[in-house]
Amino acid sequence: MAKLSKKRNKTILIYVLVILGSTILGLSIGVISAYLRSAPSLDQVNIHQDFTTYIYDVKGKLITDLYRENRMPVDITVLPDHVKNAVVAIEDDQFYNHHGINFVAFGRAILVNIKNWSFTQGGGTITMQLARNVFLTQKKTITRKLEEFLWAVQIERKYSKDEILEAYLNEFYLNHGAYGIEAGARTYFGKSAKELTLSEAALIAGVIRWPSRYSPIVNPDISIERRNFVLSRMQEVGFITAAEAAAAKAEPLQLATRSERVNQARYFVDYVTQRLVERYGEAAVFGGGLRVYTTLDLDMQKAAENALLNNLPVNPQHEGPLTQPQGALLALVPQTGEIRVMVGGRGEDQFNRTVLAMRSPGSAIKIFPYTAAIDRGVTVADIYMDEPTEFTLKDGQIWKPQNYYEDFSGEVTVREAVESSLNVVAAKVVEEIGPQTIINYGKKMGITTFVEQGRINDVALSPLALGGMTKGVTLLELASAYAILANQGIKTNTTAILRVTDSNGTILEEHKPIQEVVLSEQTSYIMTDLFRGVIERGTGKNANIGRPAAGKTGTHTEYRDAWFVGYTPDLVGIVWFGEDKPAPMIYRGVRYGSWNAASIWGDFMREALKDAPIKDFPKPGGLVEGVLIDTKTGLLVKDDCTLPAGESRREIFIKGTEPTEYSPRCTRPWWQNLPFFR
C-alpha cells in the first residue's frame, strides 16, 4: 500500500514538473516570440542623419551655416583606408566578420560587468552603436540593449557594411559641436577627413569613446596617449606595420587654430532662413545639409554696414536696449532683382527694417506722381506756379502745403520742381493727374501698402505729394520701384536666393527672374534724367559719387524719417533712418534729414562700385534732345535769342511732346524782357 502511494506521488510530481516545465517553456517561447515580433521592419530601418546647411554669397563665400548638429556628410569612397581602419580598430575590430552582434565581445562585457557589479561595458558593435545613436536612446538599461540587438540585426539585413560604416563615420560626436569624421577633421586639424594623416586619423578615432576627456583641445596629453593606443590596436589587428605605428606615434600634435563660427549679415540670413523654412521645413533647413547660394555680396554688405552704422546719429536721451535712431540700407540689381545688400538695423534685434518697417517716404514718394505725369504727356519743360496755394480736400478742409524753406519760386519747370523737391508743385501735379491714377502707377510699380478705403486713406493730395502715407512703405518695395526706372521700365521680381541644392548636389530650386514691362523706355529715361538733376544740382548733392547716378531725397515733415533712394545703371541703393518709435530727429540742437541719408548713400556707393567700370544710362530711341527752351515759359528759344543767364536750357523730350511754339520773350531784344520794360 505504501509502495502504491509512493508511486502515485511520484507520478503526480512528474505531471507537476511536466506542467510547470511546459508553462515555463511556453512563457519563454511567448516572451521570445514577443521580443522577436518587436523587431523593426526593414521599412522602418531608414538611417537619417542631420547635416549642416551652408549659405553662400554671390561670389561663393561662406556667409554662415545652420544646424542643430554640426555634421558634414562624407562619402566613404573618398576616405583613405587608414581613416576607416582607425575607427574600426578601436571601436569594432570584428566589424566585417559579424552580422550586427559580436557575441564573444558581448559575453566578455557581461563577465566584466558582473565582476565589477556595474554596467560600464556594453560589448557593442559599430552597428549597435549606430542603432543606438540613430534610432534609440543613450540610457544604459537591459531593455535598451535588447532593442539594440534587434535594430542591429535589421540594419545589417538592409545595408551593406560600407553603408553602415559610412553612416557611423558621419554620426559620432567629437566634442566642440562637431559631429562625424568630416566636422571633426575640420575642427581639430582644419582639413577635410580625406586629407588626414595616419596619426591624425588615430587621434580622432580615439576621441569617439569619451569626447569630453579625449579631446586634444581639452586634454592634449591624454589625447596623445589615447592616439597611441589606437595606433597600437591598428598594428595588433594588422592594419598597419610596427614601423608605421612608431612613425605616427612620433608625430607632434599640431591642431588648427580655432576660429569663431562664421555669422555675417544676420538680417539677411534671417530673411533667407525664413524663406527656406517656408519652402522646405525646419528639419530640412537645420538638418538637411542644404547648399544655399544667395544674391548677397559680402564685400558690398561690409561697405553698407560701415557707411550706415558709422554715420548714424545717436539720441543721447534714449534709454533702451537698441540705439536710436535706427537705420537700414538695401541694395539690389535692377536687371535681375537680386538683393546685394541688406542691413536691417543696428543692434541685436530680429526686426529687419528693410522688409518689415513701413515708414513715411516723404518726398521719395514723388517718383509716382511725376512718373504718371511724364507718362501721360507732361514734359520736363512744362511750367507750374510755385506760390502759396490752398487746396480744398475731400472732407472740406483747406490744405496749404509748404516747401522746405517756406519760400516760393514762382514760375518753375517740372525739372526745377523735381530738383528742388517743391511740395506745392507736386500737389498740383497730383491734383491734375488725379490721386487714384497716381496710386495705380504706384501699385503697378510694386507698392502694396497704399490704403484706398476707409475714413483715412491715401487717395488724397497730401499722401501722394508729400509721402505721408497711412501705412507707409518698406525699403524693399520702394527700392524695387526705383529699379524699374534703372531697368528701362521693366519690373523684375526681387530675390535673395539663386539656387538651393541638397547634400548630394541635386538642384531643388533655381531662381528664374519674372519680368514685366510697366513703363516705356522713354518715360523711364526722362524720369532718370530728372533724378540725375536732383544729385547734380538739387536736394541730393551729398549723393554725388562722380559717376552717372540718379536719385531722390525724402524727409518726413516733422523730421521723423530720412530717406535717399538712388541708382546707377547697375545698382539701386536705398537708405532710411529714424526712431523706431517715430520722433523728430533733432539731437543736441542739430536737425537730421534726407541730406544725411544722401551722404550715407554716397559713402556706400563709392565703396561698393570702386572697382566697377563707369557706365551711363542707356538712351532709348524716340527722344528729341538738345531742344533749347525758355525756362520761364517752357517754349522754344531761337538760336539768336539772348535771355538772361540761367533762363534758357537745352532739354530732352519724348518725341512728339516737344514744344512747337517760340517764347514770346524772344520777339524783341533780351534787355526789353527785363522787368523795367515789361
Image: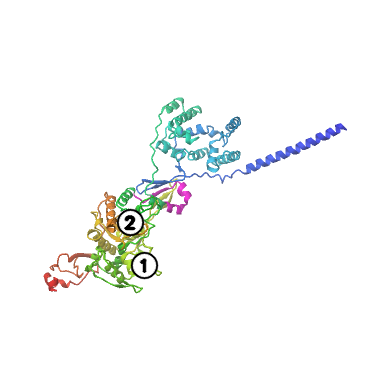
Q: In this view, does 231 lie to the left or right of 360?
A: right
SS under mark 2: strand
Query: Nearest the camera: 581 or 376?
Result: 581
- Give SS at disc 1: loop
Residue 620 visible in the snapshot:
no
Name the kind of residue labelled 1 in the image: Asp
Direction from residue 193 to residue 336 in the image, left or right: left
Residue 565: percent from left, percent from top: 30, 58
Q: Position of residue 377 (x, y in %)?
A: 27, 69
362 up-or-down from 47: above or below: below
- Vertically, is 515 above or below 89? below
| Location of mark 2 (residue) | 577
Q: How many labels does the image show?
A: 2
Taking the image as shown, residue 47 lies to the left or right of residue 331, namely right
Residue range of the region highlighted in magenta in the rendering: 273-297
> In the image, which disc is placed on residue 458?
1
Q: Position of residue 229 (x, y in %)?
A: 48, 29
Q: In which quarter of the image is the C terminus?
A: bottom left
